[in-house]
Amino acid sequence: MTIRRLKTYTGSQGYVYQYYFVGKRPAPQSAADEYIFDVTSDRKLTYAVSIFLPHQVVATWSTSHGRPLADSEQYAAVKMRLFHAFDELEDMQAQGRQLWIDLQSLEESLASLGVE
């Protein structure tokens, strides 16, 4: 039996989200990794949120910074993308089920964490 660590995040829209990381897998029909989280804002309905990190974005970042992006750094960027969605979207369930990370958002997320 897998015990998942339920975490809480208060978004700037006023919602308090609870979420946990389900897993990572190659994205179907895309050259990206898919990170899956289960999310709830009312403790009644839980839904999956997929965040896609394209391989080309990671490769471009690695080339421009002269080193590979560690798995933990990739996960940190994905989690920051989830938090940005919690802050920006009024209806996470309707608008935030599939989120993508582009190079600019990857750079900004990692810079905010002090990753260079």
Image (tube, grey):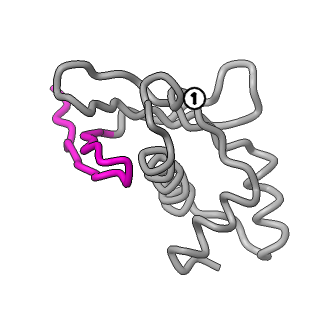
Q: Does the stretch in magenta take in 8?
A: yes
Q: Does the stretch in magenta take in 108?
A: no
Which amino acid, mark 1? Gln
Q: How many marks?
A: 1
Q: Is residue 26 left or right of residue 79?
A: right
Rendered location of residue 58, percent (x, y): 73, 54
Q: Is residue 55 left or right of residue 14?
A: right
Residue ID at (24%, 44%): 16
Rendered location of residue 53, percent (x, y): 65, 43
| Residue, disc 1 | 98
Which quarter of the rendered picture does the N terminus lie within? top left
Q: Which residues are magenta?
A: 1-20
Which quarter of the rendered picture does the C terminus lie within? bottom right
Residue ID at (58%, 76%): 115
Please tell me which residue lies in front, 75 or 101: 101
Compared with 116, 40 (above or below) is above
Compared with 103, 36 (above or below) is above
User: Residue 93 occupies which quadrant of the picture?
Assistant: top left
